[in-house]
Image: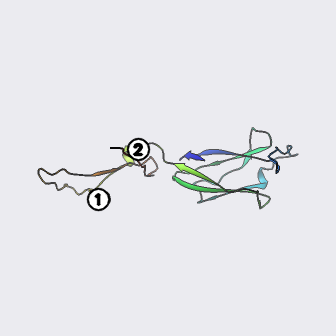
Amino acid sequence: NNAGTGGVNLHVSMIDNNGIALPPTSGDMSSKITVIIDPTPDEEPQVSKSQFNNAYKFKLITTTAGSYFVKIHVDGLPIGNSGFEVIVSPLKTSPPQSQILARNGIGPVPNPLPLTAGVQGVVFVQSRDEYGNKLQYHSAA
């Protein structure tokens, strides 16, 4: 499961051991469903009825890229096979959040930048998204 920072809707369907959808309950079970996300996202997930038959949804909202582990409980008990990973990817590069780093790739560039005539100077650009998440680029040079 891969999502971008900002938010992703996740739907949970109630099925039996054979993967058959359970018949709709006589009421809304949203208040009985608890979603536990580790690490804790920016906003607590709110469970609500989905437009799909006997399904519920919640939104994972975070500005921090990385791996999140999601567990779902009903009436305080974990759902079988509950526990799955959601990988949140950074957004596109935001120039104002990106940084130029020193020759070793860490720390700020000295001002003025000391260079030697006839020797190529090197600086590194650390690209970041609008939330400050580092972007990783690979080059096939």
Tell me the mark number nearer the camera, choosing from 1 and 2.
1
Percent of width and height locating residue 72 = 72, 56
Read off the residue under disc 2. 94
Percent of width and height locating residue 115 = 16, 54
- 82 to 27, vertically: above or below: below
The answer to whether residue 33 is left or right of residue 88 is: right
Read off the residue under disc 1. 104
Instruction: Give me the disc on residue 11.
Output: none
Task: Check disc 1 and give the amino acid type.
Answer: Asn
Query: Whole-Å distance between the Cαs marked 1 and 2?
Result: 22 Å
Q: Secondary structure at mark 1?
A: loop
The answer to whether residue 83 is left or right of residue 129 is: right
Percent of width and height locating residue 75 = 80, 59
Crowdedness of circle 1 by 10 Å Cα count: few (<14), some, many (20+)?
A: few
Q: Residue at x 30, y 51 (%)?
A: 124
Q: Residue at x 67, y 46 (%)?
A: 10
Q: Residue at x 61, y 45 (%)?
A: 8
Crowdedness of circle 2 by 10 Å Cα count: few (<14), some, many (20+)?
A: some
Percent of width and height locating residue 84 = 65, 54
Task: Check disc 2 and give the amino acid type.
Answer: Ser
